């Protein structure tokens, strides 16, 4: 009897344990389900990209750009007064040492002590979205944003976010977000082969600093001359009117990578060459397609171009300042694509363009 | 009998020529001979045919008589036209003066004269040198198409995408503010 009771008791215990295990497993699984994780990631990402609209800070930021077997970097002292006031001091590289930029996200003054000049940049003309709220819908459509483990950046606790392409499954970017303020403290961008293409990280940061507004006034010190940067053309989403106004026939790509769409365009004449630019993006990555009737490949001043076939054309490509540039001539036009895509991806886009 | 007039030992070229002449001679008829008499008389036949015809004439009195008649006619015509072709000295002088006299060239002839290589080549060389010197001393005006730099394309791309979330603001600002303090910037005040 005891033996039978004992046997039944063990069976009930095993059954209860199994049910409990299944319940715990179901609870755990529900807690890390892709949909919920993505929702958490999306929410944290949305807060992080808008955090500097409400958080003032002062810090030292180091940025590194990898170009093949070489790297370039900037070291800057950043003072930011929320929502839109910025002072950026350049400590490195050597050619920028002493340069200071004061910006309100629409207009920027570049102070060059060595030239005794103040150069004005109207960045709102070329990139109007700098001063507008971030629309992350396209990013959420194309990327899974997953929350990773916590880490320490510049002495502060940070949560990591991984942005993985929903189309290719490739990790495109990781960022470390301040657990207290949601500021982005560190960021790494990855190339198509999985290597790091660029990274930036705060070495030190002090959050909640109260700056006097006068520190960010756009003024010209006595003895210095104000000059205007020529700019890069007015950006517009009315790309149809841009095409109609050209003195040559624009050829559009028939192939775009998954998730990419036409965003905006501009026309500008530089050194006598009238060039149209169309910007395509997937919310995170971008590329620009340039076309002009010069039928001349660009001059490679700092990088050595390498050959690459673009459809039937003989193209060239190089890494220039952290961007991939592919250029070729076809149908009397010069076509150049610049962006954070691989040369192979860009060549595939180029092969679908038939001037 | 005609074959025996050729030596048995000849060089290759001589053998070919003589064999050809022998064949011509063997098939030469009076009809063939009459058609060649004028050329024979003026020495315009090739050696082999000339020899074959000569042999034929030695054995054919009819063709020989035809040749004599042809020769007599030629001599008669030559002596007659020799007298008529002697133009008066005054006429010859006027003709020579007219030929030597300068006449004004027409437009087409003038152009042709300028396009002669002896004139054209040095002129082209001078033009090339002048154009090269002018291009060096005075670069093409801003309105002429030039070769853009890769830096221009990258800067313009960054300028139009600096509001994207993937970029590094400090690096982008560095790119956009590099190499703009010189000729590209225009005085605002």
Image (spheres, helix red, strand yellow):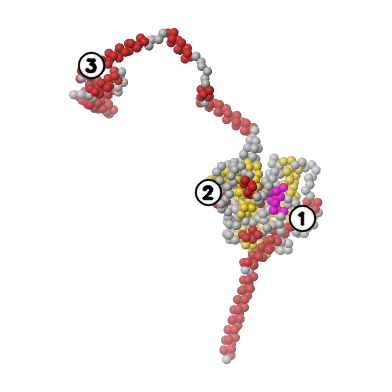
Give the chain letter at badge 2: A
Is A128 inside the magenta-drawn segment?
Answer: yes
Q: Which residues make up the magenta segment?
A: A122-131
Q: Which residue is mark 1?
A: A81
Q: Which residue is mark 2?
A: A311
Gap between marks 1 and 2, in whole Å?
A: 49 Å
Residue A290, percent from left and from top = 61, 47
Residue A226, percent from left and from top = 76, 43
Q: Residues within 10 Å of mark 1 (few under 14, many from 20)?
A: many
Q: Residues within 10 Å of mark 2 (few under 14, many from 20)?
A: some
Residue A214, percent from left and from top = 81, 51
Q: Residues within 10 Å of mark 3 (few under 14, many from 20)?
A: few
Residues at discs 3 and 2 in contact (Cβ within 8 Å): no
Residues at discs 1 and 3 in contact (Cβ within 8 Å): no
Quick check: can you spot residue A148? no
SS at mark 1 in the image: strand
- Front: mark 1 or 2: 2
At x 61%, y 42%, the residue is A247
Q: Which residue is mark 3?
A: B65
Give the chain letter at badge 1: A
Give the answer, above or below, for where A121 lies relative to A15.
Answer: above
Q: Quadrant of residue B187?
A: top right
């Amino acid at each position: 009897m005891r033996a039978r009771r004992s046997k039944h008791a063990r069976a009930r215990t095993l059954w209860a344990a199994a049910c409990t295990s299944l319940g715990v497993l179901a609870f755990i699984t529900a807690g890390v389900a892709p949909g919920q994780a993505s929702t958490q990631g999306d929410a944290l990402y949305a807060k992080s990209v808008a955090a500097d609209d409400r958080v003032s800070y002062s810090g030292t930021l180091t940025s590194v750009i990898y170009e093949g077997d070489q790297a370039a970097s900037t070291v800057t002292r950043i003072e930011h007064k929320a929502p839109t006031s910025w002072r950026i001091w350049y400590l490195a590289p050597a050619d920028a040492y002493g340069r200071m930029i004061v910006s309100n996200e629409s207009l920027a003054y570049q102070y060059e002590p060595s030239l005794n000049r103040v150069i004005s940049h109207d960045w709102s003309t070329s990139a109007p979205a700098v001063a507008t709220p971030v629309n992350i819908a396209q990013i959420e459509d194309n990327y899974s944003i997953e929350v990773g483990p916590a880490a320490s950046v510049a002495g502060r606790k940070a949560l990591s976010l991984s942005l993985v392409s929903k189309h290719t499954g490739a990790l495109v970017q990781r960022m470390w977000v301040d657990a207290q303020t949601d500021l982005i403290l560190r960021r790494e961008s990855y190339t198509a082969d999985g290597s790091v293409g660029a990274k930036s990280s705060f070495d030190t940061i002090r959050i909640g600093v109260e700056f006097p507004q006068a520190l960010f006034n756009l003024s010209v010190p006595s003895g210095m001359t104000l000059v205007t940067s020529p700019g890069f053309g007015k950006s517009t989403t009315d790309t149809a009117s841009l095409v109609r106004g050209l003195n040559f026939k624009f050829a559009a790509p028939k192939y775009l990578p998954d998730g990419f769409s036409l965003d905006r365009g501009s026309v500008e004449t530089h050194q006598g060459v009238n060039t149209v630019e169309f910007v395509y993006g997937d919310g995170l990555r971008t590329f620009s397609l340039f076309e002009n009737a010069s039928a001349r490949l660009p001059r490679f001043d700092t990088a050595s171009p390498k050959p690459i076939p673009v459809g039937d054309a003989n193209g060239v490509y190089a890494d220039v300042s952290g961007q991939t540039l592919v250029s070729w001539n076809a149908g009397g036009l010069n076509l150049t694509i610049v962006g954070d895509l691989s040369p192979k991806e860009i060549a595939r886009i180029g092969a679908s363009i038939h001037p | 009998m005609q074959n025996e007039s050729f030596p048995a030992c000849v060089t290759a070229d001589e053998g070919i020529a003589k064999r050809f002449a022998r064949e011509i001679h063997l098939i030469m008829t009076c009809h063939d001979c009459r058609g060649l008499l004028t050329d024979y008389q003026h020495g315009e036949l090739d050696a082999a045919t000339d020899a074959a015809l000569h042999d034929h004439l030695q054995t054919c009195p009819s063709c020989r008589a035809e040749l004599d008649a042809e020769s007599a006619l030629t001599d008669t015509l030559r002596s007659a036209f020799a007298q008529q072709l002697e133009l008066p000295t005054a006429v010859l002088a006027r003709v020579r003066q007219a030929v030597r006299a300068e006449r004004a060239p027409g437009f087409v002839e003038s152009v042709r004269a300028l396009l002669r290589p002896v004139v054209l080549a040095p002129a082209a060389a001078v033009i090339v040198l002048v154009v090269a010197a002018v291009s060096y001393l005075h670069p093409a005006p801003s309105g002429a198409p030039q070769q853009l730099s890769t830096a221009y394309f990258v800067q313009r791309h960054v300028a139009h995408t600096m509001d994207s979330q993937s970029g590094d603001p400090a690096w982008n600002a560095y790119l956009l503010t590099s190499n703009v303090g010189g000729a590209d910037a225009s005085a605002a005040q």
